[in-house]
Amino acid sequence: MLRSEEMDSLAIFVDGRDIRSTFDVLGNSKMIQIKKLNKFENVSLKNIERVEQMMAYLKIKNFEDKTIEMNFKTAREEIIDIYRKMVELSHNEKSIFIHRQEKEEEYVMAKEAYVFVEEINRGKNINFVTAIVDDDKKFLIKKVLKTALKRNCYVKLVDVEMKYAVKNKSVMIIYVYGEEATLRVVDVINTMGGKVMQECDRNDKENKNEQIKESNKNVNNVISVENILELKEELREINMQHKGIKAEIKNLRLIVKKQYKSWLLAIYKERKIYEGINCLKSNKPVSFDSAEEIKDVFYTGEAWVKTKEYERLKNQSKFAGTKRFYCEKIKVKENEKIPTAFETNFFTEAFQNITNVFGVPKYREINPAIFMIFTFPVMFGAMFGDVFHGIILFIISSYMISKYDKLNHKCGVLQILLNGRFIIFLCSLSSLYFGLLYGDFAGMPIKLFKSQFETGYTYPFGIDPTWHHAENSMTFTNSLKMKMSLILGFVHMTIGSTIDIINVLYEKDYITYYFVSLPQFFAFTLFLGYLVFLCVYKWLVTIDHPSLVETLIGMYTDPFNMENQMYKGQLYVQLFIVFVILVSVPIMFFGKPLYIMYVKNKKENALDLWINSGIHTIEFGLGLISNTSSYLRLWAVSLAHVQLTSVLHQFTLGSGGLWYKICIFPVYALATLLLLIGLEGLSSCLHALRLNWIEFFGKFYRGGGECFEPISFELTHEEIYDE
């Protein structure tokens, strides 16, 4: 994992008769990545897209996690068959649903009209209109009828309960006098979205009187008990038909639920095969509509394979007793980008993903993910150092690790935390270590050993707990954490600078090594390393405690004047450091361009060389200050975390009596989880990520690589559900 896998470029030759079986084997072996030499779109890919649209129409979300090996032809036939059945059943179900709703409306109107007639005239003929309207329009329709008929009508509203109606309905019975009034009532109700039990043709003015008489006669027939019972029986039969169709649709969905993953895998496999074929070049266009047209076709192309898997690929390519597939190594083309492949496991995968988010490493450069396994948790722990909070993170991460198989893909938005369970676990250990080092436990000091504050001896580990109660406690801890931040930053960036030298030597770029990497390494090491040396020396040796700030400022503003010397020969050491830094800057700026122009005699891109060299020199010079000060965030965030923890403890469990503590404990627990663990933990994580991406990666990381993506028929969980 320190460096990416070595890759070989291959030339491949495939006979058209074996093209599908060849890609079938290659996809199952997951060994080669086809180079995209051909950009034409095969017409067969459109057929696959149409089948995928059919799958999307089914909209199956909950399916059985079972896969049966199935070829594309079988899957396509089954999908089309079920699709047609589903379309037909859905159409019938919709028609019966509407018919059932209409029949129920007729039944309800007839029943309410019968009740009205029985109450009013005991069977005598009267002129009235029965209608059913939406419940939210009934009063508006009533008002319009009163206005249109100048209140010469009687309107009765009845709220009814309907099993199959989409919206709430009300039955409206309107008693009017005269044929013209009846037609006007029918027009108003139809215009406003209602339905009349017996309608008259408004346009047929010559026969309107006969229509009204016939309508009244039909109404009297409809509202008979026999007709109401007949409507009820028809409604029951329609409902049974609807249930039967729903049952058939449910059975089809069960079939789809069982076969969904097998179908999806067959379609995905077919798509991958044709995507691979489309990357190759053929001697003539092929549509794959018949077997005859591929007899005289052969394909050529190029691919990437891991060096260690080349022999295995050659052995696996001799399948089914055929010899119509051939591959051989070829020389990598100039300026061709070689894909990057890392062997990861369940532990290192998360760190590699974090690195790839910033940028995929260049081929064969040192992989920074291996260092982030150590540096990321250390930076996090330096800011989040608290034993109590570390224990909480440890419990959470341990639970996620032990229950991973059960929780995987069932956490929703928290899936990202589950994927980073090992990162959280390492961060919890680092938080525990720095919490013991700082002596903090939920805002309270920890006493691991007997205090040595008054005896003058050194406390065995961490900060003496007595310092937490001293008057200058804040001054002492701030000074200590600030210097620790600088030391951590120096070690972190020194590792990055060392990796840069190793990368340059591995690539045999000696120009960059002598004129860029070495000057930068010496300038950085002497600039920040000397400050770290003074911090440690002051802790161990010095008695009069000279100010480090004054020493450093005087070192660069007045290097020949030394008022308060910390050690013998300090003036000459500092002059040497200043000299090396001043010499390194012009070497970085002038060295590489002059060497390329006058030694290599390459003066074509002279301006680009000078601009590039100037930008990198200025960036390095500014980075000496900005990158160093950036690590002070370790001290600042740690201070903020301690203060928030102390304030929360002071205003909750740190005050009041026993009953107050019991009552306030839920507030304390909630604030600890959401504010200190959630918000502060996220803040520390982002700061640690920034220090690794910018300060650490900036010393050596080139990036710009491409991930090695071999042909594979395996479906990820996200691909299954996205489909």
Image: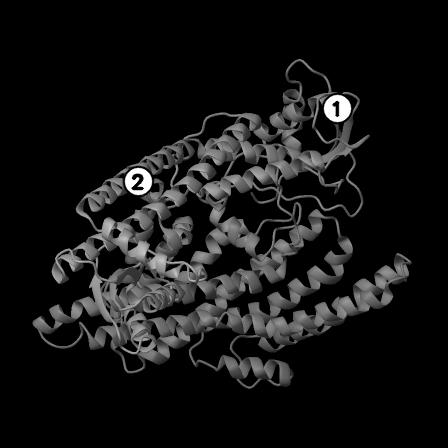
* Front in this rendered view, residue 462 or 149: 149
Give the alpha-carbon distance from disc 2 to disc 1, as whole Å: 56 Å
* Front in this rendered view, residue 196 or 453: 196
The reply, left or right, for residue 445 in relation to residue 16 is: left
**What residue lies at 37% left-to-right and 44% top-to-bottom?**
408
Query: Element at badge 1?
Result: helix
Q: Quadrant of residue 114?
A: bottom left
Q: Quadrant of residue 199?
A: bottom left
Tell me the amino acid under the disc marked 1.
Ile
Tell me the amino acid under the disc marked 2.
Ile
Can you identify the residue that label 1 sits on?
Answer: 294
On the image, the x and y values in percent for residue 266 come to 54, 31
In the picture, the disc for residue 599 is none
The quarter of the rendered structure image containing the N terminus is: top right
**What residue lies at 78% left-to-right and 33% top-to-bottom?**
285
In the picture, the disc for residue 238 is 2
Does the image show residue 456? no
Label 2 Cα crowd, 10 Å radius (few <14 / some 14-19 / many 20+): some
The reply, left or right, for residue 320 in relation to residue 299 is: left
Q: Nearer the viewer, mark 2 or mark 1?
A: 2
The reply, left or right, for residue 484 in relation to residue 526 is: left
| Looking at the image, residue 231 lies above or below residue 185 | above
Does the image show residue 216? yes
**What residue lies at 51% left-to-right and 54% top-to-bottom?**
354
| Looking at the image, residue 262 lies above or below residue 670 | above
* Front in this rendered view, residue 649 or 712: 712
Q: Earlier in the sequence, mark 2 or mark 1?
A: 2
On the image, the x and y values in percent for residue 387 come to 29, 61
Do the CB atoms of the residues marked 2 and 1 lie less than 8 Å apart? no
